[in-house]
Image (cartoon, rainbow, N blue to C red):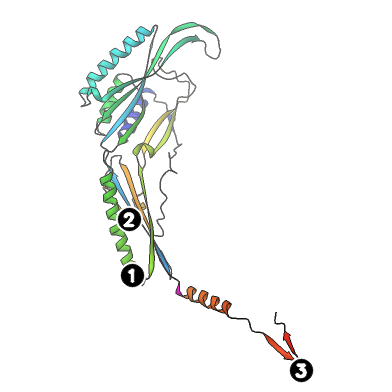
Amino acid sequence: MKTILLVTLITFSAVVSYAQLMNKNYERKKDNTLKYDSEHEIVADAYSISIVTKVMYNAVPDGYHVTYTKSFIGKTIAEVENTMNTKMDELRADAVKLDVSKKDIVIDVTSLDPIFDVKLNTSDSSGLMGYKATINIIFHIKNINTLARLSKLCLEYKIYDMINADAYFNDSKKIYDTLALKAVELLKVKKELAKQIGWDFVGGKVAFNKLNDVVYPNERYLTSYIKNASLFRHDISQNSSINYNRTVDVDNYFTYNLKDADYVFNQDKTVPVIQFYHQINYTYTKVDTEAQMREKIKKEEEKKPAQVYYIIDKNGGLKKIDTQ
């Protein structure tokens, strides 16, 4: 998505040269992914050992669904519909030149609203002025490099606002199978290391669990704010309202640190990728023979009959001694 950032910044620096970039970055959905313990991959004592194996796959998406929003305003519904249909037909024709077929362009009308003549900072209205139709334009593209040219084309049609760019991948099963095989391979290596250090995998029981996760590019973005220092009056033909500050989201792609995994497939990819994770938590527990022996002796002692002591009194009789 670096191309989106570049096009966005160039465009708004030309339209609003006095905008200031505010340092208000935040990470979206940062708590929705797996938590890895990168410090303790192997933990062992005399009777148990735990091994964590983590692998990652950077998959280049098979395609993207890119959505823009646009508004059309006219005095009548017919005028709005005619303008919208004409512009969208022209846009489809030009998009074909970017290898985007017409069947991969969907126009979704999200609202049709009346417009009233309302004075700023008052509730007075002089009546109906016209209508505004708001649409979402969804493009299905195969290559991220098409996005820059598509954004340029949309700017030529005065389509300024991108809603999102959702990546998808067709066959994740092959990736998870590859990750599973690699995780088992690395687990064997770590077990062999434990043996060389002196840990013995004999007389115990195995327990394990696996964790899978997938993170799409649109879930891992940082957002900054561009705000104007003075009143910004947006063109009336756009889907925006008059405000003292206009806020523009600028996306910057965020990726995991590669040290979060034991092995990373396609770690050299620089385009926004879909990140697949696979983690195995393996535990081997031996029987604590010393503890078993102590418990056995304790039970045997409890089963022994209690000893009773007597003394002979001065009359020659037996008297029981209370030992409690």
Q: Secondary structure at mark 1?
A: helix
Whichever of labels 3 and 2 marks the residue nearer the N terminus, that label is 2
Residue 255 in view: no
Residue at 32% over, 55% down: 262
**With 132 as the anchor, is 266 left or right in this view?**
left
Out of 136 and 39, give the one closest to the viewer. Answer: 136
Q: Amino acid at mark 1?
A: Lys
Label 1 packing within 10 angstroms: few (<14), some (14-19), many (20+) = few
**With 321 as the anchor, is 115 left or right in this view?**
left
Disc 3/disc 1 C-alpha distance (Å): 71 Å
Residue 209 at what x, y percent from top left?
Answer: 38, 55
Out of 315 and 186, give the one closest to the viewer. Answer: 315
Q: Which residue is mark 3?
A: 316
Quadrant housing residue 160: top left
Label 2 packing within 10 angstroms: few (<14), some (14-19), many (20+) = some
Out of 229 and 165, give the one closest to the viewer. Answer: 165
Return the mark for residue 262: 2
The image shows a total of numbered marks equal to 3
> Which one is in front in this view, the residue at disc 2 or the one at disc 1?
1
> Which one is in front in this view, the residue at disc 3 or the one at disc 2?
3
Q: Which residue is mark 1?
A: 195
Whichever of labels 3 and 1 marks the residue nearer the N terminus, that label is 1
